[in-house]
Image (cartoon, rainbow, N blue to C red):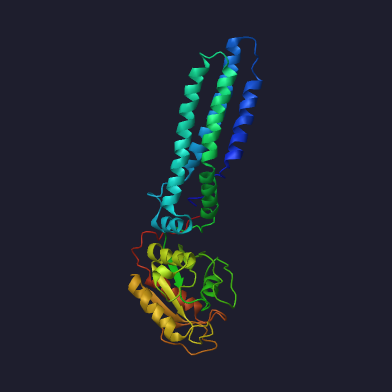
Amino acid sequence: MIFEKIPTILTSEELLDKAFRRAARARKGKKIVSRKSKEKAEESMLLTASNILTDNLSNTVRKFPSFDQVPPFYRDLADIIVDVDQMRMNLSSLQWAGEKIKDLSRKYVGIMRTSEDPTVVRKQAIGRISSIINSIDKNLRFLNDARNKLRKLPDIDMGPSIVVAGYPNVGKSSFVSHVSSAKPEIASYPFTTKGLAVGHFTRNSIRYQVIDTPGLLDRPLEERNDIELQAISALKHVGKVMLYIIDPSETCGYTLDKQMHLLDGIKKQFSMPVLVVSNKTDIADAGESDMSMSSLTGYGVDSVLDRLVEMIPSEEPGMIAETG
């Protein structure tokens, strides 16, 4: 997954401790027998600390992916979770600090070579470098928090995908568990899906992806929470066909009229094939739907999956056969 390679980001205190310990070791290995050797030892100490800090900062910036090149699906999720513009600003602060430290170390090495006491100069340089690192502590902490959140995103490929949508507690998670490798949390109360649960199945040697979205509530886009916006992102960028599940028994807590009204809104917002399926037909008659099933007993589930596969455009470029 594109965010897995982002390393743990140290705090300013941890960075300085790492740099100074390495610098102390670098100086310890040098014998002080003359003014020149003392200068070299102090210079080595300063450059070692500087290099450790600049390398860590540049490595952090480099390991974050370019969000101009990230697939739209992941960019939307990252923007929802951590705010991409804020992340860019914080990364710029790290880049600035690295360049400033590099310039300072070069400047003070030059001063050191003409000063009477290179130790005093080295201490002055370390003091200024420490101030720079301490000034970006909030940026380091922001980026480490962002890194931890981004690494938890599901691994979504761009192959043929079925997105499962509908009101909370209509049976979305149960359906995904039946047909794929995913084992999302299933419970008898709303909002149990806390993020995107992704599963896979294979038909005719082609690997398909099925995505369980959080419950989509019937309210304007700007009023939806972050989890619901993740579902919107999935529908826009990943889904090739949508399964919209309704609960005609209304045991989900929402009337059938509300469920159908939400469906109308989704159809207006997204241009993809939609299969409307009545679930819980073990306890209620099918409502206004294309097919019916019971994800509890398994009745009709395979037939629904077959129909969804048929509805995915055959020219879909992501339809790659399994090998091996």
Residue nearest the viewer, comparing 101 with 173: 101
Q: Is residue 4 visible?
A: no
Q: Position of residue 209 (x, y in %)?
A: 47, 64
**Number of residue marks:** 0
Residue nearest the viewer, comparing 314 with 281: 281
Q: Is residue 139 found left or right of 185 in the rendered image? A: left
Q: Is residue 280 visible?
A: yes
Q: Going 48% across and 34% down the picture, which residue do you hit?
A: 98
Q: Position of residue 116 (x, y in %)?
A: 56, 13
Q: Position of residue 301 (x, y in %)?
A: 50, 78
Q: Going 37% across and 72% down the picture, which residue do you hit?
A: 311
Task: Find the residue positioned furthest to the bottom.
Answer: 285
Task: Find the residue positioned furthest to the top.
Answer: 34
Relative to 259, does residue 198 appear above or below in the rendering? above
Q: Position of residue 59 (x, y in %)?
A: 50, 38
Q: Quarter of the image holding residue 29?
A: top right
